[in-house]
């Protein structure tokens, strides 16, 4: 399974810039969700904002792309870029 790390220019908060790093890892949906799952693709995303780490699970199934935190979560866009670049296959 492919893994990619990428730094993304962060937001400025006052005088400091927040550095955002994203690590995407493809997972086996059958192993993680079970035999009866409708999930076709599954990714674990580790987002790091300076010293804060946020972990996401991003799913693709009949409902489309979504994160455990919702469809509007930034991790969904990160995974879509990751798969579009050909890394998630």
Image (cartoon, rainbow, N blue to C red):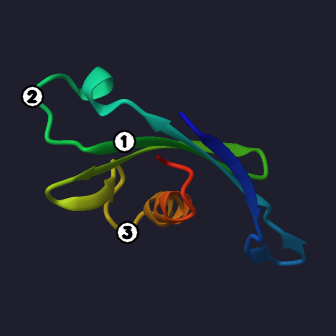
Residue 11 at x, y percent in the picture: 73, 74
Other residues around mark 2 within 10 Å, as few (<14) / some (14–19) / many (≥20): few
Q: Which residue position holds label 1?
A: 42
| Separation of marks 3 and 2 at Cα, in angstroms | 26 Å
- 12 left or right, relative to 84: right
Determine which of the numbered discs, if any, sits on residue 36 in the image: 2
Q: Depth-wise, is mark 3 or mark 2 nearer the camera?
A: 2
Please give the name of the residue rendered at 53% of the width and 33% of the height, measured from the top-left corner.
Answer: 1
Residue 46 at x, y percent in the picture: 59, 43
Kindly state the secondary structure of the residue where label 2 is placed.
loop
- 18 left or right, relative to 65: right
- 72 left or right, relative to 39: right
Q: Which residue position holds label 3?
A: 72
Q: Say whether marks 3 and 1 touch (CB < 8 Å).
A: no
Other residues around mark 1 within 10 Å, as few (<14) / some (14–19) / many (≥20): many
**Where 79 sits versus 35, above or below?**
below
Please give the name of the residue rendered at 32% of the width and 64% of the height, measured from the top-left corner.
Answer: 71
């Amino acid at each position: 399974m492919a893994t990619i790390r990428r730094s993304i220019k962060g937001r400025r908060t006052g005088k400091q810039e927040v550095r955002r790093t994203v690590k995407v890892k493809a997972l086996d949906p059958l192993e993680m969700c079970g035999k009866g799952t409708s999930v076709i693709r599954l990714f674990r995303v580790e987002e790091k904002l300076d010293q804060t780490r946020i972990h996401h699970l991003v799913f693709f199934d009949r409902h489309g792309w979504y994160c455990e935190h919702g469809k509007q979560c930034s991790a969904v866009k990160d995974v879509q870029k990751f798969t579009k670049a050909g890394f998630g296959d």
